[in-house]
Image (spheres, rainbow, N blue to C red):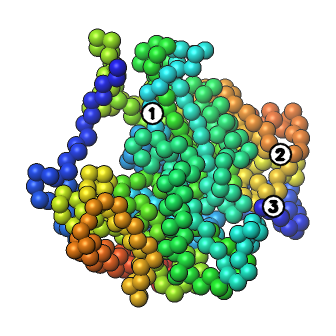
Amino acid sequence: MVTIIPEIIRESITNLVKNGERSDGRSFYEYRDISLETGVIEKSEGSARVKIGKTQIVIGTKPQIGEPFPDTPNVGVLMTNSELLPMAAPDFEPGPPDERSVELSRVTDRCIREAGVVDLEKLVISEGEKVWMIFLDLHVLDYDGNLMDAAVLGSVAALMNTKIPETRIENGEIIVDHEKMISLPIKEKALMTTFAKIGGELIIDPSLEEEQIMDARISIGIREDGSICAMQKGGANPLTKDEVIKAISKSQEITKELRKHLPEN
Amino acid sequence: MITIITNKEFSTGIETSERADGRAFDELRPIKIEAGVLNRADGSAYLELGGNKILAAVYGPRELHIRRLMQPNRAVLRCRYNMAPFSVDDRKRPGPDRRSVEISKITSEALSPAVFLEKFPRSTIDVFIEVLEAEGGTRCAGITAASVALADAGVPMRDIVVSCAAGKANGQVVLDLSEIEDKEGEADMPIAIMPRTGEITLLQSDGHLTSEEFEKALDLAMNGCKKISEEQKKAILGRYG
């Protein structure tokens, strides 16, 4: 299904941006309301429900014991998967993940993996044989623009909320002790900010309308020390070098504020 | 070798005549329904029944793109029942499996009789049911939530279909089986009805029942449906009343 955007909406949003305004009254570097709850799914070892504006994602983690990849025998495994549910938007179709869904999960995975959010080396149970595999599943329930920032924020919160059983080896046997649940080793809280380019300006946290008419998009993952851990440019139009550099410096500033939504520990 | 130490209690209540969670034989688990919880969908509902957390959304009536499914004289009602990978103890692989395909089919058939499909020829009404957390009886909870979502979408209906299970656990005919009772019990029988007429739109049975027990279970389930029906109405009135 193709979404048709009336030319008049495209013009009005672009003109607003050129005048320094946005259709929902926000400033260029202002997020919509954000809400973040953790522990929302009891059967999941870690979970979070994140809302940015009316975009809503439920994220759950499932740890499983498995074998490490042969090329990395002494690190655990993190698998990120997302589903753009057909309930989330009229143009999301049921079926295997389409390219938007694959992009979302891969960008989220990159941001979390490259930042070192989870200390995967601590997830080894028996080197080269058994490791924890953490499945991170993103369930997109309502799509109102800017899935990436919501996905990373919710994923970090869900990982922080995750508890796995303690394991030990006794006489060559692995003991998985569900009576002693421990938190995942979290060593970094990286977050992502996305900007849309409209009318030659960059605006943060694009709404659905803004996403539908934007020329280009840039998502930037920033670690706590301000370094960059992931980037993704999207959209069919180019960005200039100055625009990218400006987006990075704004992102470094704004992720500090964004990080306050995460729980304390 | 992997040894797993577990702290989960699997009390089936066999030692006593009581139910594992202390309910009376004709008692439902705590239930909560909310209508209109999603922004993009035409209609939506969120339902909690015991440990079940279910979200239902409706799109339509809208254009049907798959021509071979198109009906010249009425709309088709398509359902997709889906479980989140994190909704169960062991991660469920994403995507449809045989169980969810069957549940989708019977859900569509349970809801269709209540909807004035003949008013929307050549179109589709799409019902999406997402199980965010499962604790026994998700198909019934899904149907109950989907009916509220249909009403929230303003789809014209004869009645609001409601669903509930009864069955036999620990030698006793009981209402609304929990996960443990479903697993350890002798029989599970989900039904759906149109509460104004009492007509049955879904009936499944899995397990062993005598015909006397069947009749008792059916009466129990129908009464359960009527109680849940009140909660459905409350949810719709809560949004529009």
- Of marks 3 and 1, which one's residue comes earlier in the chain? 3
Closest to the observer: A44 or A55?
A44
Q: Which chain does tag 2 point to? A: A
Closest to the observer: B239 or A76?
A76
Percent of width and height locating residue B130: 52, 58
Q: Which chain does tag 3 point to? A: A
Q: Nearer the viewer, mark 2 or mark 3?
A: 3
Residue A110 as seen in the image, left or right of residue B181: right
- Amino acid at dot 1: Pro
In the image, what residue occupies the spot 18% across and 57% down? Answer: B170
- Of marks 1 and 2, which one's residue comes earlier in the chain? 1
- Amino acid at dot 2: Gly
- The answer to whether A49 is drawn above or below residue B41 in the figure is above
Name the image quarter holding residue A12: bottom right
| Farthest left residue in view | B16
- Amino acid at dot 3: Val
Q: Nearer the viewer, mark 1 or mark 2?
A: 1
| Farthest front residue in view | B211
- The answer to whether A174 is drawn above or below residue B168 in the figure is above
Residue on which disc 1 sits: A63
Closest to the observer: A9 or B128?
B128
Residue A251 as seen in the image, left or right of residue A140: right
In the image, what residue occupies the spot 58% across and 48% down? Answer: B95
Secondary element at tag 3: loop
Disc 3 residue crowd, few under 14, some 14–19, many 20+, Cα 10 Å:
few
Q: Are marks 2 and 3 on the same chain?
A: yes
Residue on which disc 3 sits: A2
Percent of width and height locating residue A233: 79, 38
Residue on which disc 2 sits: A235
Q: Is residue A46 visible?
A: no
Percent of width and height locating residue A200: 88, 48
The total of numbered circles placed on residues is 3
